[in-house]
Amino acid sequence: MSKAARIDLEAVEAAIRAAVLSAGADICTELLKATGKGRRSAQVICGCGQVMRSTGIERKVLTTVLGAVPFDRSRFECPQCGASRYPGDEELDISGTTRSPGVRRMTARAGSRQPFKEAREDLRVYAGIEVSPKDVERVAERIGETIAAWQRTENEALLAAAIPRSNEKTIPVLYVEMDGTGVPMVASAVEGRKGKQPDGSAKTREVKLGCVFTQTFTDAEGFPVRDPDSSSFVGAIETADSFSSRIEAEAVRRGLYEAEKVVVLGDGAVWIRQLVEMHLPRAIQIVDLYHAREHLSDLCRVLFSSDEKKMIHHRIRWWHDLDQGMVEKIINEARMRLPADAETRKKAEAELNYFNENKERMRYAEFRKQGFFVGSGVVEAGCKHIIGSRLKQSGMEWTVRGANAIIALRCLIHSGRFEEFWESRAA
């Protein structure tokens, strides 16, 4: 075949795609001609209660997945307060926006997954949708805020509902895991807050993340097996009290009252203990084994800082004791080795206090016999993947509003509930 006869397949694909989309946009334009204008069977009522009057037809150009589509619709104005309404916009779910529902869905998903500039480029390359990075940010955050409001309404209903009287337990084990991770913020969001910077200031705010999942079986060796696709996530930058209601509602939604056993896994933080005691009082509490091991390593570094061999020896031995749940043995042996130096002794006692306060949550041998998970790996992975990979990239700084909107959006997507939300929004 001669060089002149060769076909540039990519160019052909692009041309055909553009032609098909253009034809689709023309069809969409025709379909919309009968929507949003003409004589109405019912009066248009303003929010103030007055009957609104038609002021004629106005056009706006919609950005759709097919391309630009003009839409002519009737405008109504209130003679009393001057407010306006476009019933056609309301019918098509495009009030206050020129972007179609399909474009907004795509934009929100793209903006939830990657920086807004990269999302904008992917929308252009993959879908032929031309938007600016700021457009992506606005749409993603607006939908995230709508999701947050939708979930608040759902949570209030869940927590207000009466506890079922049925004793039927259909879920063998329901797990609730919680953790926190810092997100870089703009200066105004951390002003006056204490942090880990050398001058005592803060550059981050803590996102509290919760995960709920179920377990039905253990494997042949007795290790617990998480039910496939059973993990759901909730989170926000908020107080412990607000998060308490959020995670309790998610546990109720997932079957808290139908669970034979409820297990809470966390890092031993005081706020988690207090949350569980108030909102999930029948739960079995377990301190994540790997956090406990980290604290033991820190204790060994404090006690044996001048003798690395002793430090390694005691760490290995005490890790074994910890795996057996023999926390009192570790505490007693460590107390016999407390240093004389006041500052060092204070650090060691702080670590011992952590073990003393959490000893009943560290009976790992017993927990394993019951077939429970003893590590909070699911929520820790969530902190890295749901929060860290999107909100903690180099150079990023967030407002609380913006971060919480993206967190709500990402949690819902990773919980497999985005389509449920979208259906409810359009209903």
Image (cartoon, rainbow, N blue to C red):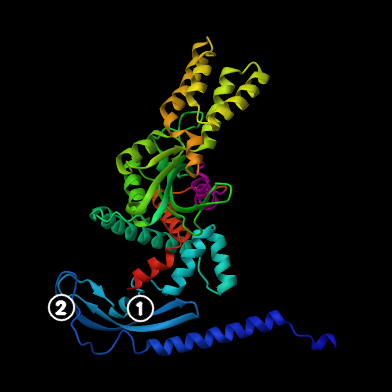
> Is the C-beta separation of discs 2 and 1 under 8 Å?
no
Label of residue 405 in the image: none
Considering depth in this image, is 171 or 236 the residue closer to the camera? 171
Residue 187 image-quadrant placement = top left
Considering depth in this image, is 223 or 202 the residue closer to the camera? 223
Report, in whole angstroms, how far the alpha carbon at label 2 lies from the one at label 1.
Answer: 22 Å
Q: Residue at x 49, y 38 (%)?
A: 288
Callout 1, which amino acid?
Answer: Leu
Label of residue 51 in the image: 2
Left or right for 50, reference 40:
left
Callout 2, which amino acid?
Answer: Val
Under circle 2, the secondary element is: loop
Considering depth in this image, is 130 or 276 the residue closer to the camera? 276
Point out the stretch of residues depicted in magenta. 375-393
Which quadrant is home to the N terminus?
A: bottom right
Q: Which residue is mark 1?
A: 92
Residue 308 placement (x, y as % from top left): 66, 20
When the figure is inspected, residue 330 is found, relative to residue 168, above or below; the finding is above
Looking at the image, is mark 2 or mark 1 earlier in the sequence? Answer: 2
Considering depth in this image, is 282 or 3 the residue closer to the camera? 282
Residue 36 placement (x, y as % from top left): 31, 84
Per the image, is 96 magenta?
no
Residue 287 placement (x, y as % from top left): 46, 36
Q: Nearer the viewer, mark 2 or mark 1?
A: 1
**Residue 99 seen in this snapshot:** no
Residue 358 image-quadrant placement = top left
Per the image, is 387 magenta?
yes
Q: Residue at x 50, y 32 (%)?
A: 197
Under circle 1, the secondary element is: helix
Q: Main secondary structure of the magenta part?
A: helix
Which quadrant is home to the C terminus?
A: bottom left
